[in-house]
Image (cartoon, rainbow, N blue to C red):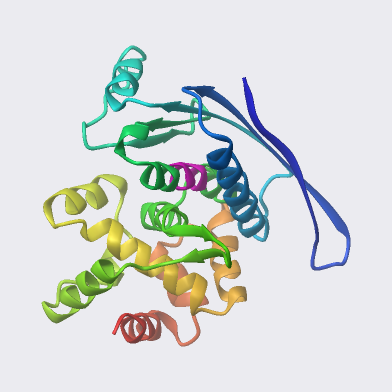
Amino acid sequence: MRFLTFIILFFTFHGLLHTQTVQVDYVGDPISQKDHQKIEQMLRYEVKFYSQFGLPDTLSLQMHVFKRKMDGIAYLAGKNIFLHRSIIGMYSSSLNKAFILGWEDGREKTLGVIYHELSHHFTRKITNNHPPIWLNEGLAEFFEHCKINKKGIEHTLTEYEQGRIRTMYMLDEINLSTFVNKNNKQFLEQEYTDEQYSYILSHALVTFWIEKVPNQIFKDFISALQDPDDRSTIFQLIDRIYPKGFKQFEQDFKTFCE
């Protein structure tokens, strides 16, 4: 059953009309028209954001939503994909599918997970399928924490997350130069052993990049990630691109968090 198919039109920086087509095919348990509309609105918002970084003109994705988490876990196990019971969503770039496990966890929470998994699809598309994990998860967390209300779409870095970051700094636990270079295994090990450290710090970093850093600097950073010939570490890229280097980046981020 086709769920979402639409075309987004907007003007590029050159004043030319640009067409962006994103097709999301839906399979799984039915959802309400109200939720359908919210997902479509957020999808448009995400596509507009990612388009500034060279998102391909035409994209397609399948989204499979399960009402009961255990049904989703069993379905994926049948495809030799085994998930921890705490996981309520995943994106597979190889399958080009997003799996959402369980409306039973709450409507708003599940909508956030859908926004999160859609973001993974777009982040991989603008980084040649190899995003740094903190950027991949940070962007996904950013969109997961967006709410649609009468004023439009608003993002929130929660009070708990802000307090957790301040505590990290107070205990001298944050080492950004090490963190931005972590691979997937190192990132997840710290996440599971240190009270959501990795996801919260990633969310805060991406919020800083989007809400406080001049947009052109963020664009330059993504552009550097797209260069297949650039062998720099993420630390080296930020040190080169951010005004006055990585030390200034660290100081500005700390000031933002405090």
Relative to residue 180, is residue 238 depicted above or below?
Answer: below
Residue 128 is at least partly visible in this image: no
Query: At x 33% / y 60%, what residue is drawn?
Result: 181
Q: Position of residue 90 (x, y in %)?
A: 38, 35
Judge from the rendering whether residue 244 lies leftward or rightward of residue 152; answer left or right. left
Q: In the picture shown, does residue 46 fall above or below 92? A: below
As drawn, the residue found furthest toward the top would be 78
- Which corner quadrant holds the C terminus? bottom left
**Nearer-the-camera pick, 4 or 140:** 4
Q: Using residue 220 as the reference point, say whether residue 51 is left or right of it.
A: right
Camera-side residue: 153 or 62? 153
Residue 81 figure quarter: top left
In the rendered image, which quarter is residue 82 located in? top left
Closer-to-camera residue (229/100): 100
Q: Residue furthest right?
A: 16
> Depth check: 200 or 155 in front?
155
Tell me, yes or no, whether the highlighted magenta stretch contains residue 133: no
Residue interval drawn in magenta:
114-120
Q: Residue at x 62, y 55 (%)?
A: 45
Give coordinates of residue 203: x percent, y percent: 36, 62
Q: Is residue 23 left or right of residue 199?
A: right
Question: Picture coordinates of residue 120 (x, y %)?
Answer: 48, 45
Task: State the count of labels.
Answer: 0
The reply to whether the magenta stretch includes residue 118 is yes
Q: Quadrant of residue 17?
A: bottom right
**Does residue 138 appear in the picture of this structure?**
yes
Quarter of the image that includes the N terminus: top right
Task: Provide residue 116's location: percent of width, then percent of height.
Answer: 44, 47
